[in-house]
Image (cartoon, grey):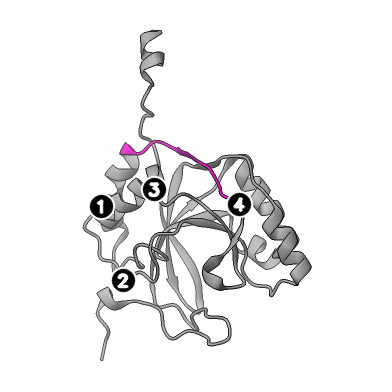
Amino acid sequence: MRRHDDEHDDDHENPETGRPWRRAAGIFVLAEIGGGAGERIREIQRKYDPKLAASSAPHVTLIGSSGAGLIAPSTTVEELRAAVGPIAAATPPLSLELGPPMRFMQTEIVVLPLSPHGPLRALHEAIKTSGLRFGRPRFAFSPHATLSFYPTLTPAARRELLSVRVREPAIVDRLEFSLSNDPQPPQSLLTLELTGRRERSAAAADQR
């Protein structure tokens, strides 16, 4: 019996790692982290998790992990563009503060958290309520940039990693839509730039 698109949640988890054996097909929305923060995160990944550093650019998963499940895999590029294009056009590039490293959900995964409130949350909610179809989320919205995913860290390496700080702001200026269908490699579907105008402060407006 074919499962409905709205039910494309993860399959059973590996009991040793808590990670899914195989993620069901669906579309992620990723936001690559640019600027000095992106460079610093890549440097940390290369030291502690070279496999992660080689597999993807530093990013935050905006849709498909926490807060909202994967977008239905049958969604077309035209449907994605129609639903999210106006949101991207109205959203200015974001400059976000990264928190200190933490272990994610009591796993061996180490991440840099971002605030689940503010402009990133507003962007997440706008996409979530855009009319697209989503699978069930696994967690409450908990945006983050991953520093280490694959290795089992030694106690010394874990202490070192948890002590690092990324002071530079995380710059997010585009959305990447990627179709995941394990075991095939992810397929890039669409890129939308955030082109909204930043609101000027009252003081700046008075100086005109």
Q: In the orientation shown, which residue stands out farthest toward the right?
A: 156
- Report the mark closest to the observer, 4 or 2: 4
For the residue marked with disc 4, what is the amino acid?
A: Pro
Contact between marks 1 and 4 (CB within 8 A): the answer is no
How crowded is the residue under tag 1: few (<14 C-alpha within 10 Å), some, or many (20+)?
some
Q: Mark 1 points at which residue?
A: 83
Q: Name the residue under label 2.
A: 135
**Looking at the picture, how far across and down is residue 75, in whole percent?**
28, 65
Quadrant of the drawing holding the N terminus = bottom left
**Residue 145 within the magenta-colored segment of the rendering:** no
Quadrant of the drawing holding the C terminus = top left
For the residue marked with disc 2, what is the amino acid?
A: Gly
Q: Distance between the residues labelled 2 and 1?
A: 17 Å
- Looking at the image, residue 27 sits to the left or right of residue 31; the answer is left
**Looking at the picture, how far across and down is residue 176, in whole percent?**
44, 54
- Examine the rendering and report whether any part of residue 45 can be seen: no
Q: Name the residue under label 4.
A: 100
**Looking at the picture, how far across and down is residue 90, in whole percent?**
31, 37
Q: Distance between the residues labelled 1 and 3?
A: 22 Å
Q: Distance between the residues labelled 4 and 2?
A: 30 Å
- Report the mark closest to the observer, 1 or 4: 4
Q: Quadrant of residue 71?
A: bottom left
- Looking at the image, residue 28 sits to the left or right of residue 127; the answer is right
Rendered residue at 56%/40% (across/down): 169
Rendered residue at 30%/44% (across/down): 87
For the residue marked with disc 1, what is the amino acid?
A: Ala
Among the two numbered marks 1 and 3 on one chain, the one whose residue lies closer to the N terminus: 1
Q: What range of the chain is rendered magenta?
A: 90-100
Tell me, for residue 117, which label it has, or none.
3
For the residue marked with disc 3, what is the amino acid?
A: His
